[in-house]
Each structure stands twice: as C-alpha cells, then as structure tokens.
Image (cartoon, rainbow, N blue to C red):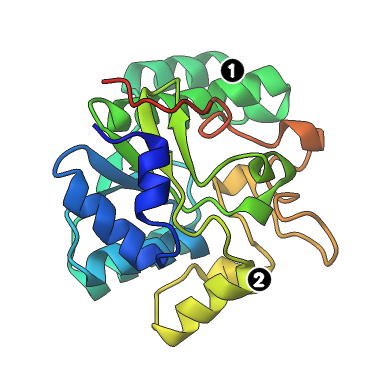
Amino acid sequence: MMKTQEIKEAVKGKSPQEVLAFLAQNFAEGLIFSTSFGWEDQVLSDMIFTQDLNIKVFTLETGRLFTETYYTWNRTLEKYQKPIYAFYPDKEKLEAMVTKKGPSSFYESVENRKECCGIRKVEPLNRALQNQKVWITGIRADQSANREDMDWVEWDEAHQLIKVHPIFNWSLDDVKTYVKENNVPYNPLHDKGFPSIGCQPCTRAVQPGEDFRAGRWWWEDASKKECGLHDVTTNEEVFKP
C-alpha cells in the first residue's frame, strides 16, 4: 500500500484532475469522496464525474439541510447521471436525542451541539468510511486557521486511512472560476453570503470582512467551529491496513 509521501511525490506538480486520476488508477477499491454540495465539493464532483473515475461519491443526509442544498443535489444528479450515496443518522439515536432534548438542543450548549453533530454527521461518516483506503475531500487551506496547519495528503489516525485534499492550495477565486468556466451546478446560497453551508439551523450568511466560517454555529466561540469531521487527523508516513 502506498505511503502518504509516495503519493505526494508521484503527483507533484499535477493538477487536481490528474491527482484524482492517479488515485483512481492506484486504488482500485476503497476510494471515496465526501460532498456537502458546496463550491469546493461541486468542483471535485465535476472532475470525478466528467473523467468517469472509479471513486465513490457520498453525502451525509443530516435531515436538517437547506432546500437549496437539496436543489443542488438534484441538479448534480441531472447533469452527470452518476450516483451520490446518502448516509443517514442512526434512527434510534436520533429519536432518543430529539425525544429527550427537543429539536433545537444544539443552541443550548457546546456539548449538546457536539452531540447533535455526532449523531447526524460523525457516526454516519464513520460508517461511510469503514473499509476505505483513501478519503478525498474539498478542504482548502484558507477556509479556517486550523485547516492551514493541515497537509494536502495526510494520515487520518481516527479512521485509519489516507486523506487527500486535491484543491487544498486553491483560492476561493480559483474555485469560482472553475465553476463558471465549466458550468458546474452550485448552491444558490453562495450568492446570498453563505461561503460555508451546513445544516439550516446552524448556518447563517456572513457579513463583509467576517471569517469564512463565521456563519457556522455563529452563537459559539470561534475556536469551536468544527463539527468533528476533520479535527482528528494526524500525519503518519505508513498506511496502516
């Protein structure tokens, strides 16, 4: 199995499209891409689908998404005619939480919010990543301070797989240009001040000058603005089966 450093060296200087093609050629199985239908993810979906790459595309259907997100999901299916696999929260855990704490407990404390994210996002993600070897994401370095400390190819200790972020060094302008030039379907909320889009109750538009992720969990301290999907990664040189 390839090491993270071997992947970096093999695709050095290559475009994101070439990186994706390389991964598809070298990981016949266990290659997966997570999309939330934001700008960045739509760019990568376009690259995967137009090249007809053997990469499984999936999304986390939390049950609290924006109408505009479902619209983008449908437009993506219509344009590319490729499957996008949906992973839902565990029914019993979700029912128990909402029964005990109500539908909006995440506003009451960080602990409650993390519990909701854990049930609606983290646990379904863990199921999606089971037995996978490489997880592809649309993360960019300038999306938040903690993401600048990440590497574009890294070892995810929690999930025991390699993570690859093909457009890690792209700017938001790079993303927008690609979307426009390639007629990629995108979420209409991006035109309304939503650079980062998650669940509807937990996302608002940002004001000029605000941080990219200021609209996510806006009632919390800025240092807590992650849901647990991407904050457990550590780098290792050897892929562990």
Q: How crowded is mark 2: few (under 14 residues within 10 Å), some or many (20 or more)?
A: few
- Above or below, 111 against 71 in this view is above
Disc 2 secondary structure class:
helix
User: What is the CA distance from the residue labelled 1 to the residue labelled 2?
Assistant: 32 Å
Nearer to us of marks 1 and 2 is 2
Q: In which quarter of the image is the C terminus?
A: top left
Q: Can residue 31 be seen in this view?
A: yes
Q: Is residue 97 above or below residue 48?
A: above
Please give left or right for residue 139 compared with residue 94 in the image: right
Give whichever of 181, 90 is nearer the camera.
181
Q: Residue at x 57, y 64 (%)?
A: 170
- Which image quarter: residue 76? bottom left
> Horizontally, is 146 left or right of 174 in the view?
right
Which residue is identified by label 2? 192
Residue 57, x across and y down, in percent: 27, 50
Q: Is mark 1 on a helix, strand or loop?
A: helix
Measuring from the top left, give residue 218's x and y in whole percent: 76, 43
Res. 101 mark: 1
The local crowd at label 1, few if under 14, some if 14 to 19, many if 20 or more residues have their Cα within 10 Å, is: few
Q: Position of residue 4 (x, y in %)?
A: 40, 37
Identify residue type, mark 1: Lys
In this view, the residue in front, 146 or 103, is 146
Q: Position of residue 9 (x, y in %)?
A: 40, 49
Extreme residue in the bottom direction:
181
Question: Quick one: 69 or 4, which is closer to the camera?
Answer: 4
Amino acid carrying label 2: it is: Lys
Between 77 and 130, the one lying in front of the other is: 130
Residue at horizontal 34%, vertical 66%? 17
